[in-house]
Amino acid sequence: MEVKCTIPAGENGTKQLQREYGEQLICVRYRYDRKRQKRFKTIELIIEEKDWTPGVLVPVEKRVYIRIDYGERELREKIKEAGGFWDKQRKAWYVSYKKVIELGLDKRILDEEIYF
């Protein structure tokens, strides 16, 4: 389906839906299905609102500490190949953030100032 038109809440074409959904309405979209020759009117709604603290944007060149358990030899080798090294004082591996993301190891980051 192809989106032809997106109308933000409050503009012409959304008034009736805005009366129905109130501040929950974000926008109205018109989607077209060429194969079935149909037009669909869809809406985007807010269904839940929670407080959120944004994380810190980490530059990809920044180096971070990660946890790798003693028995994870293969992973340790991958970190070495990625340019990482062992920090004896912190007892953790030190490697570029970019490599951590590429290897899917972001949950192992030990730096307290980095939030996800």
Image (cartoon, rainbow, N blue to C red):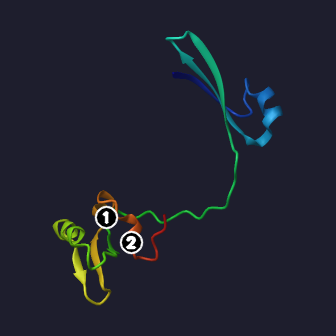
Label 2, residues with CA under 10 Å away: few <14, some 14-19, many ≥20: some
Do tag 1 and tag 2 residues touch (Cβ < 8 Å)? yes
Q: Residue furthest bottom?
A: 89
Q: Residue at x 56, y 9 (%)?
A: 37
Using the rendered view, name the quadrant where residue 62 is placed.
bottom left
Q: Residue furthest right?
A: 19
Q: Is residue 37 left or right of residue 96?
A: right
Which element type, helix, strand or loop, lies under badge 1?
Answer: helix
In this rendered view, identify the residue nearer to me: 15 or 88: 88
Residue for badge 2? 109
Q: CA distance from mark 1 to mark 2?
A: 8 Å
In this rendered view, identify the residue nearer to me: 65 or 18: 65
Residue for badge 1? 100
Using the rendered view, name the quadrant where residue 50 is placed.
bottom right
Which element type, helix, strand or loop, lies under badge 2?
Answer: loop
Horizontal and vertical percent for residue 107?
A: 41, 67
In this rendered view, identify the residue nearer to me: 114 or 40: 40
Instruction: Name the residue type under label 1.
Output: Val
Q: Is residue 6 left or right of residue 110?
A: right
In this rendered view, identify the residue nearer to me: 61 or 71: 71
